[in-house]
Amino acid sequence: MASSSISKSIKGFTLLESIVVLGLFVSSIVIASQIYFNLMRSVVMAQSYQLAFDNFRFGTERVWNGIKNGSNFVPSLSGIEFLDHRCRRIRIYPNLNNLIFEIDDHESFLFDNELVELQSFNIYHDNPVGRSGDPYYKTANKIFLINYKVNLKTKTAKIPLEVWQTVAPSNSVFLNNPCQ
Amino acid sequence: MNKAFTLVELTIAFMILLLSLTVLAGLSFGYLSILNSIKTRYIALNIAQEGIEYAIALRNKQIEKGFSPWPGVAERGSYCLYFVTTTKEVIAVPSTTPCPTMISEYRRLIHYYDFENPENLLLHYSNAVRVTSEVDFRGEKFKLDVILTKWHPVQYPSP
């Protein structure tokens, strides 16, 4: 009599109910973890993309500032040599998927190898009309066009980026050579 | 007596769960979208700066050749400036609509005005011109300004 009353008041789940609940639980966990992993991957990718982009931007600004305030340019298609505002010899040229920024024979990479991979680097420039012995403003280059093609490295992918940079050097209309 | 969840309770619970996941996903996509916007602005400002540099180089090339500083842009108005890699010259073409640039989808127009008298139509005798480089990217506009003088080391010595 007593056992019959217990079997009536305490009722367990059926096997089907348990399987359905377990199935729902597992699928919700799978969906939530997928969303979480995608979210984390996006955040990591965004952070490393930002780092790579900033590194590229700082590097190119260094080149732009150097040329803007520089003088005595000797450009070629894939590199440039000039004197900076302190009349130090600067050379910029590509090497091993990076750019070398050389100051008075001291070489250093312009970009962080872990963040930026250089694909190509080209320089276009005008042809001054002056000859040797003419005032500086007749022989100095007036414009440089620089084309960078790079891959920004993130943890999961390489993002291609192409940038054109144009510089008209400030010193190019001086009568005398600024580094005479 | 044990009571099961009602359909309304379950729906509300799922809605809350879904909302929290949507907010999290939105935050992540928002971050990516901000980064994309930074890249767009960087390229647009680079192209606007390129226009300013062309204007400076155009004036400096005239100085190099011993000409007046503003040929090619002698009238107030809008121009497209280019560097032609074959002839190695900067050229100015009058235009009313923005022109294509080296990067597709970005278009640029450069406006020239007399700095001292903006109503002046002829810039030939202007002492200074205001150059505005305007870049258009999918309807969004980016502008940079510079004032250029006709200063010249030989023709216009400082007093």
Image (cartoon, coloured by chain):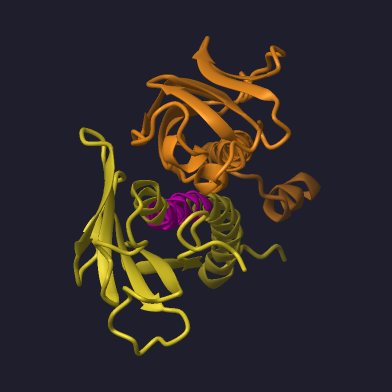
Chain colours: A orange, B yellow
Residue B132, image quadrant: bottom left
User: In this rendering, would B86 be left or right of A8?
Assistant: left
Q: Is residue A39 left or right of residue B59?
A: right
Magenta span main SS: helix
Q: Quadrant of the C terminus of chain A?
A: top right
Give me the residue at 55% from left, 48% from top. Answer: A170
Seen from the viewer's position, the closer of residues B2 and A28 is A28
Give residue A51's position: percent from left, percent from top.
64, 36
Q: Return the residue nearer the eye: B118 or B63.
A: B63
Vertical relation: A98 (above or below) B99: above
User: Which residue is at the front of the view, B145 or A120?
Assistant: B145
User: Magenta stretch: residue B139 in it?
Assistant: no
Q: Residue at x 28, y 55 (%)?
A: B81
Left or right of residue A19: residue A141: left
Q: Residue furthest bottom?
A: B119
Residue at x 61% of width, y 33% of height: A59
Residue B134, position as x, y percentages in the image: 38, 66
Q: Is residue A19 above or below residue A105?
A: below
Q: Is residue B1 visible?
A: yes
- In the image, farthest residue toward the right: A2
Rendered location of residue B153, percent (x, y)? 52, 54
Residue range corresponding to the magenta coloring: B37-56
| Numbered disc total | 0
The residue positioned 60% from the left and 64% from the top of the image is: B158
Q: Is residue B48 highlighted in magenta?
A: yes
Q: Nearer the viewer, residue A33 or B79?
A: B79
- Does residue A158 show up? no
**Residue B112, placed above or below residue A39:** below
How far across and how far down the image is residue A167, in percent?
A: 48, 43
Determine whether B85 is above or below B66 in the image: above
